[in-house]
Image (cartoon, rainbow, N blue to C red):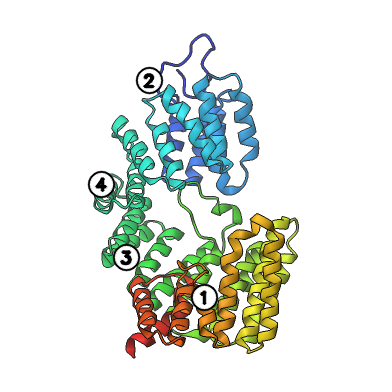
């Protein structure tokens, strides 16, 4: 049947026939989309839609590609209208694309189930279900689907980088390395192939080779934000913090020029510009350069307040934590207060989110009081948080570990070590920072062996999150002592 024009109702498509095999523009657009060439994909799908104005697939794919520019609604509405009289397999494909565009990934998978059942020879449909599953971190299922796509059409080279990523996510490192090498052989000019090889090699701790692979991706596409980030992470893994910082700064310079909608990436998850900006602050923390880290974190919070106010509270909260760890209780309180003010001014913020951020503000202010030695005020804030949790009923239960963290922190500052330990053991012990607080409480009670065991475990983790960065200097100091 024609790839673009709906088949007559009297002639349903053959079960094994791909539903989009004979439109060159549509196929060209699919290949561009698979390789994240969004501008090329949009141009090709628009050409297909002009050539076949009654066909639902071109505008549906165009909407998927337009989603990264924030202008998908009209095209998708056209596709849905045209699909109403199309064969079931085409309607299912349009529904899959509609759900994918709307970030309804479960719905997209369900619709693609119907597509691959109706047209099992459609390699693109297997690949697309694999990509959605990859987005949903269903790595084994994604690898199966993408492998099926390649078994159905060995020429579908665009599937190869994604197979490597799925295998990597599934922890099948050797297979991922082989798949990434095959992707580079099949698509040597594609930045995505080299980026994925960088990701795989970094996971395999082959850091120099990872940096070289990312360098090739950057050389082929200097605007490739994920490639700059991936190389920065490889530098950070090697504890070359200045080199990591330079790459994060390059990534930020590109990302800061992009509109918010550019981050609605359909296959690879980009960090937003403010996330990359905060990574710069993290490199200073890891390097034990606290004044520079605080300045960089301040810049991140200010940038986010200007560009994406609803997200600024995250960075004011992180800034408060940095100040607290550096003993600057007054500056920490100011950061928490500013975050509270900014999020409170966000129009239309749902009530549950307002309550969540009010709780985090109470938490931060209470810890700031404790760090300044104002213990009565700190405990009063803990009482406020406890009442908020109790008033929320069952919905408040997930926040009880956070209350135990707050109480443990306050008691630790009071040097009431046994009481602090009892609270911290009820907090989230998977959190690096809380583990470090627990080690401090153990040492305070005289259990130095227990404290050392936690410190050794933390040193072995070499984690990259904020919690680890905040306590890295203390961990390293303990190792030197």
Q: Nearer the viewer, mark 3 or mark 1?
A: 1
Q: Nearer the viewer, mark 1 or mark 4?
A: 1
Q: Nearer the viewer, residue 123 or 471?
A: 471
Q: Which residue is mark 3?
A: 211
Going from the N terminus, do you reach mark 2 or mark 4 first? 2
Q: Which residue is mark 1?
A: 422
- Separation of marks 2 and 4 at Cα, in angstroms: 28 Å
Instruction: Say few, some or many: other residues with alpha carbon within 10 Å of mark 2 (under 14 / 14 to 19 / 20 or more).
Output: few
Whether residue 208 is visible here, answered yes or no, is yes
Going from the N terminus, do you reach mark 3 or mark 4 first? 4
Where is residue 461, by image quadrant? Answer: bottom left
Going from the N terminus, do you reach mark 2 or mark 3 first? 2
Could you tell whether 328 is left or right of 210 in the image?
A: right
Q: Nearer the viewer, mark 2 or mark 4?
A: 2
- Separation of marks 1 and 4 at Cα, in angstroms: 53 Å
Residue at image location 32% in from the left, 60% down from the top? 203
- Separation of marks 1 and 2 at Cα, in angstroms: 63 Å
Q: Nearer the viewer, mark 1 or mark 2?
A: 1
Tell me where residue 401 appears, x and y as whole percent: 56, 66
Q: Nearer the viewer, residue 33 or 152?
A: 152
Please say if 470 is above or below 34: below
Return the mark for residue 182: 4
Q: Is label 3 in contact with label 4 (beta carbons under 8 Å)?
A: no
Whether residue 36 is visible here, answered yes or no, is no
Return the mark for residue 16: 2
Residue at image location 33% in from the left, 34% down from the top? 148
Tell me where residue 116 appears, x and y as whole percent: 42, 27
Q: Secondary structure at mark 2?
A: loop
Instruction: Say few, some or many: other residues with alpha carbon within 10 Å of mark 3 (under 14 / 14 to 19 / 20 or more).
Output: many
Q: Is label 1 in contact with label 2 (beta carbons under 8 Å)?
A: no
């Amino acid at each position: 049947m024609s790839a673009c024009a709906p088949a007559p109702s009297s002639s349903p498509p053959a079960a094994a026939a791909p539903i989009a095999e004979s439109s060159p523009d549509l196929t060209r657009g699919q290949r561009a989309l698979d390789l994240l060439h969004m501008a090329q994909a949009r141009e090709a799908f628009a050409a297909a839609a002009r050539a076949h104005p009654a066909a639902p697939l071109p505008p549906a794919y165009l909407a998927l590609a337009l989603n990264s520019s924030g202008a998908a609604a009209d095209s998708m509405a056209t596709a849905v209208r045209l699909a109403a009289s199309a064969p079931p397999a085409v309607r299912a494909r349009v529904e899959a694309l509609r759900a994918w565009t709307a970030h309804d990934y479960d719905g997209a998978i369900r619709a693609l189930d119907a597509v691959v059942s109706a047209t099992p020879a459609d390699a693109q449909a297997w690949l697309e279900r694999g990509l959605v599953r990859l987005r949903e971190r269903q790595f084994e299922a994604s690898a199966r689907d993408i492998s099926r796509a390649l078994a159905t059409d060995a020429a579908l080279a665009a599937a190869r980088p994604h197979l490597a990523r799925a295998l990597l996510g599934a922890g099948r490192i050797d297979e991922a390395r082989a798949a990434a090498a095959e992707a580079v052989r099949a698509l040597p000019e594609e930045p995505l192939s080299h980026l994925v090889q960088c990701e795989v090699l970094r996971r395999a701790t082959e850091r120099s080779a990872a940096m070289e692979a990312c360098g090739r991706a950057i050389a082929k596409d200097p605007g490739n934000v994920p490639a700059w980030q991936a190389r920065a992470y490889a530098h950070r893994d090697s504890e070359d913090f200045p080199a990591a910082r330079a790459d994060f700064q390059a990534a930020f310079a590109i990302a800061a020029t992009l509109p918010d909608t550019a981050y609605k990436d359909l296959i690879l998850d980009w960090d937003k510009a403010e996330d990359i900006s905060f990574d710069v602050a993290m490199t200073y923390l890891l390097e034990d350069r606290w004044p520079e880290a605080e300045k960089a974190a301040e810049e991140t919070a200010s940038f986010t307040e200007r560009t994406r106010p609803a997200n600024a509270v995250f960075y004011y909260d992180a800034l408060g934590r940095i100040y607290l760890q550096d003993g600057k209780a007054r500056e920490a309180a100011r950061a928490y207060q500013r975050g509270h003010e900014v999020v409170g001014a966000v129009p239309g913020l749902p009530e549950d989110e307002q309550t969540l951020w009010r709780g985090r503000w109470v938490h931060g202010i209470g810890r700031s009081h404790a760090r300044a030695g104002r213990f009565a005020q700190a405990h009063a804030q803990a009482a406020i948080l406890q009442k908020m949790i109790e008033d929320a009923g069952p919905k408040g239960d997930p926040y009880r570990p956070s209350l135990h963290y707050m109480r443990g922190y306050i008691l630790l500052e009071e040097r009431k070590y046994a009481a602090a330990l009892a609270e911290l053991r009820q907090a989230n012990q998977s959190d690096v920072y809380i583990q470090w607080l627990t080690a401090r409480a153990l040492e305070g009670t005289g259990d130095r062996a227990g404290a050392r065991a936690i410190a050794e475990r933390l040193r072995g983790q070499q984690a990259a999150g904020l919690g680890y960065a905040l306590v890295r200097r203390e961990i390293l100091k303990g190792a030197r002592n």
